Image (cartoon, rainbow, N blue to C red):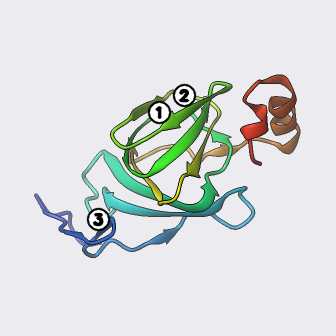
Amino acid sequence: MTPSPSSSVIKSKSDFRWQDVPTLVYKPTGSGFKNIVRRVVLGHRESDLPFQVRYFEMKNGGYSSLECHRHRHAVVVIRGRGKLFLKNKVHALRPFDAVYIGKNVIHQFHQTGNEPFGFLCMVTARRDRPKLVSPSKAEKLRRRTKAGKFVRA
């Protein structure tokens, strides 16, 4: 294993990309998402960093999986417009809005508008894997909440 650099600068490139940071598949196929990619900007090569800074980008009506997990994370929108299903409510998001998602809170991001929706997401480096909301639980959310029509699973 290559040792972590004691410090580094990762230069940005055009169009919300960073030097030597690959574009990755969001999750395995079949995880209930559409038109989304991720880039691990910090914390992938720096093994001594206790957190990761990841960039997610959605295009053309994209959305993340409907999920929850034990770890917390912080999100800062830096591009485009989107919506967030969080705690049975839908929140409109735009650049520089910040979101805190607590432990075991069901959430899902959606791209809206004409341009890609991009956000930085900060999480601990060691964390649990997301737990997808079951189809039956998603159906209950759709039926029981005002925001339910927004849920995709």
Q: Position of residue 5 (x, y in %)?
A: 15, 63
- Give the side of residue 147 with respect to residue 119, left or right: right
Vertical arrangement, residue 82 with respect to residue 54, above or below: above
Vertical arrangement, residue 25 with respect to residue 99, above or below: below
Q: Of the residues tagged 2 and 3, which is closer to the observer?
A: 2
Q: Quadrant of residue 151?
A: top right
In-front residue for pair 105/17: 17
Residue denoted by label 3: 45
- Give the side of residue 104 with respect to residue 142, left or right: left
Residue at (61% x, 58% y) in the render: 62
In the rendered structure, which amino acid carries the disc numbered 2? Lys
* View extreme (left): residue: 7
In the rendered structure, which amino acid carries the disc numbered 1? Arg
Residue denoted by label 2: 103
- Give the side of residue 43 with respect to residue 108, left or right: left
Q: Quadrant of the N terminus?
A: bottom left
Residue denoted by label 1: 72
Residue at (35% x, 50% y) in the render: 52
* View extreme (front): residue: 114
Label at residue 17: none
Residue at (61% x, 52% y) in the render: 64
Q: For label 3, count other residues whose C-alpha is less than 10 Å away and answer few (under 14), some (14-19) or many (20+).
A: some
